[in-house]
């Protein structure tokens, strides 16, 4: 085993222990929570090692990094998640490899995703990114739609060819009423998910929690956690 593989295996084991302990504390089965490893700024060689170690979901937030990496790893049994703010001029590229886009936050983006998914003859899963730092109908600092905009956007995704409404995503906000209150933020997201599933029962995915707050996300009921640093290490600065 190479030094890097041993390092990643040890880190994965620690994260696995954290998720398992959080599930136990919350009275949940471990199988209820899916780990997504965020591989941004790390090379395709790390993605290949992660796949060898049993990881099946990876995420990226910049298309210019993700597209070549996904192409290089196209032989691996991976689901690729796009988690960054997505400009419409990058949609064609992202639809080429992403199985799920977790950062859907405006109608113009839905229209572009639908057009490209149909063109590529693919079905792309979509999560509505919820901004808990935004006004009811505004947008958040790190993207996302305010609470009042969820229903309309969800209906639009559900009605758009080539797209599948999978659920909701949030990032713990740095400002506003939920700043520093990660578990309260994630519990709010779960409440919003319950409302969404009333209209769209299959949209049961709830993506929340990262390296620093995955326990709070699991306690709140998240189905997916997005972990980067705790698996791959502190990221190099982007030049």
Image (tube, grey):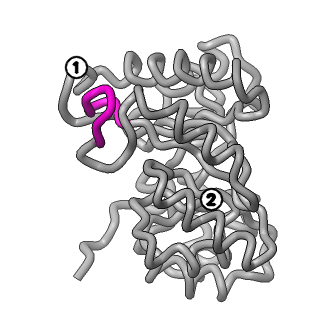
Q: Name the residue under label 1.
A: 177
Left or right of residue 114: residue 103: left
Q: Residue at x 49, y 24 (%)?
A: 189
Q: How far apart are marks 1 and 2 (CA)?
A: 38 Å
At horizontal 69% and vertical 54% (from top left) the residue drawn is 160
Does any portion of residue 39 appear in the rendered image? yes
Identify which residue is drawn at 41% across, 19% down: 183
Whether the magenta-drawn stretch holds residue 69 is answered as no
Q: Where residue 134 sits: x, y (%)?
A: 27, 33
Q: Read off the magenta span.
A: 131-139
**Residue 135 is covered by the magenta coloring:** yes
- Relative horizontal placement of residue 196, taking residue 54 as reference (left or right): left
Residue 9 is tagged as 2
Residue 80, position as x, y percentages in the image: 65, 64
Asked if one can make out residue 55 in the rendered structure from this viewpoint, the answer is: no
Of 195 and 228, which appears nearest the observer? 195
Relative to 134, is 123 above or below?
Answer: below
Rendered position, 78 above or below 43: above
Query: Residue 117 occupies which quadrant of the picture?
Result: bottom right
What's the magenta bit mostly, secondary-structure-wise? loop
Are the residues at dot 1 and dot 2 in contact (C-beta closer than 8 Å)?
no
Badge 2 density bin: few <14, some 14–19, many ≥20, Cα 10 Å: many
């Amino acid at each position: 085993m190479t030094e890097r593989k041993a390092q990643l295996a040890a880190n994965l084991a620690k994260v696995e222990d954290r998720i398992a302990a959080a599930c136990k504390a919350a009275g949940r089965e471990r199988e209820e929570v899916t780990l997504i490893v965020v591989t941004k700024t790390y090379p395709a060689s790390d993605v290949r090692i992660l796949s060898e170690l049993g990881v099946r979901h990876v995420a990226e937030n910049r298309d210019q990094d993700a597209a070549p990496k996904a192409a290089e790893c196209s032989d691996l049994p991976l689901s690729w998640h796009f988690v960054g703010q997505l400009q419409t001029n990058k949609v064609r590229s992202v639809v080429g490899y992403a199985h799920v886009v977790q950062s859907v936050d405006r109608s113009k983006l839905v229209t572009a995703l639908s057009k490209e998914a149909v063109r590529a003859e693919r079905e792309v899963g979509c999560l509505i990114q919820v901004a808990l730092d935004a006004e009811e109908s505004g947008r958040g600092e790190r993207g996302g739609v305010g609470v009042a905009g969820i229903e309309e956007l969800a209906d639009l995704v559900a009605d758009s060819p080539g797209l599948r409404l999978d659920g909701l995503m949030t990032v713990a906000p740095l400002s506003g009423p939920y700043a520093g209150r990660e578990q309260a933020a994630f519990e709010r997201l779960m409440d919003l998910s319950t409302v969404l599933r009333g209209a769209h029962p299959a949209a049961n995915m709830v993506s929340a929690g990262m390296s620093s707050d995955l326990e709070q996300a699991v306690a709140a009921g998240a189905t997916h956690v997005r972990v980067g640093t705790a698996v791959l290490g502190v990221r190099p600065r982007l030049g």
